[in-house]
Image (cartoon, rainbow, N blue to C red):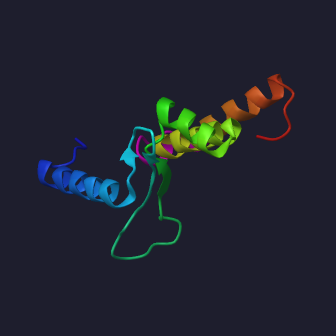
């Protein structure tokens, strides 16, 4: 039963709206998407337990916008791929090796050495 209580969700949304107002960007949408990096904030630091999710806010639309803004669509889609992988492993508990295997298989099929 993993859900975010309404009070916490309201606080999160309030802070996102604040970030939007001070940056002039919009979370999850264009024309200037707001991207967030999330790191666990435990009171006690435990080695190896600092889960991080980068580029929260990337989606199909914002990835295209990032690609156009940087004139580098490959970079944008690689960032999106990494976001999906981080979210899936940290939040959904999907094993990292499944993504690594799929990426390696695809690279091998397409005869690509580097991501």
Could you tell me which residue is drawn at 48 percent across and 31 percent down? 61
How many labels sit on residues?
Answer: 0
Vertical side of 40 occupied by 27: above or below? above
Looking at the image, residue 65 sits to the left or right of residue 73; the answer is left
Pick the front one: 78 or 44: 78
Question: Which residues fall within the magenta stretch?
Answer: 89-96
Q: Which residue lies furthest to the top in this view?
A: 109
Q: In this view, does 61 lie to the left or right of 115?
A: left
Query: Is-magenta flag for residue 79?
Result: no
Quadrant showing the N terminus: top left
Q: Nearer the viewer, residue 89 or 25?
A: 25
- Our reading of the magenta stretch's main secondary structure is loop
Which residue is most to the bottom?
44
- Side of 7 relative to 53 (left or right): left
Residue 34 sits above or below residue 115 on the image: below
Residue under the point 82% across and 24% down: 110
Residue 63 at x, y percent in the picture: 54, 36
Find residue 16 and report its horizontal and vertical position in percent: 30, 54
Task: Please state the horizontal and vertical placement of residue 96, each as a whole percent of the image.
Answer: 58, 43
Which residue is at 21% across, 48% downward? 4
**Which quadrant does the C terminus fall into?**
top right
57 on left or right of 22: right
Residue 15 picture location, percent across and down: 26, 58
Q: Which residue is drawn at 39% across and 58% down?
A: 23
Decide which of 84, 58 is in the foreground and name it.
Answer: 58
């Amino acid at each position: 039963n993993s859900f975010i209580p309404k009070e916490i969700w309201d606080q999160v949304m309030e802070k996102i709206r604040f970030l939007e107002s001070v940056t002039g960007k919009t979370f999850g949408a264009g024309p200037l998407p707001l991207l967030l990096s999330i790191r666990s904030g435990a009171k006690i630091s435990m080695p190896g337990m600092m889960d991080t999710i980068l580029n929260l806010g990337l989606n199909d639309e914002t990835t295209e916008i990032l690609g156009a803004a940087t004139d580098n669509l490959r970079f944008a889609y690689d960032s999106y791929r990494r976001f999906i992988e981080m979210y899936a492993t940290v939040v959904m508990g999907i094993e990292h090796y499944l993504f690594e295997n799929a990426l390696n298989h695809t690279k091998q099929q397409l005869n690509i050495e580097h991501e």
